[in-house]
Image (tube, rainbow, N blue to C red):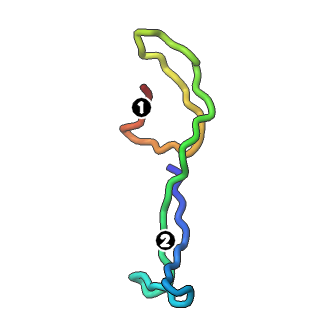
Amino acid sequence: MAETSVEVKISMNGVDFSANEFGDNSMQFGYQHQAEVLSVSPSFGSVSGNTEITVSGSNFEFGEELSCR
């Protein structure tokens, strides 16, 4: 999983910034990069299914629910 955290500061007036639970004036915001498919091979398989494929790219989130259809 390609997750990135960045510092976020919040202000209603551009001068006073909100404090987080640690007492400083910054908070962390995490986000995930969009997945990108670069290639899929083979380009065709059996109509009965069960063809093993390879998907190449970046920022995939691996887990038990990862599947192709």
Check disc 1 and report its element: helix, strand or loop: loop
Q: Nearer the viewer, residue 47 or 17?
A: 17
Residue 58 image point, x, y percent: 59, 42
Residue type for callout 1: Ser
Residue 8 image point, x, y percent: 52, 74
Residue extending furthest toward the left: 64
Residue extending furthest toward the right: 38
Check disc 2 and report its element: helix, strand or loop: strand
Q: Which residue is mark 1?
A: 67
First-in-chain label (1 vs 2)? 2
**Neighbour class for label 1 at 10 Å: few (<14), some, many (≥20)?**
few
Residue extending furthest toward the front: 13
Residue type for callout 2: Gln
Q: Which residue is mark 2?
A: 28
Q: Please, is residue 43 above or below residue 65 in the view?
A: above
**Neighbour class for label 2 at 10 Å: few (<14), some, many (≥20)?**
few
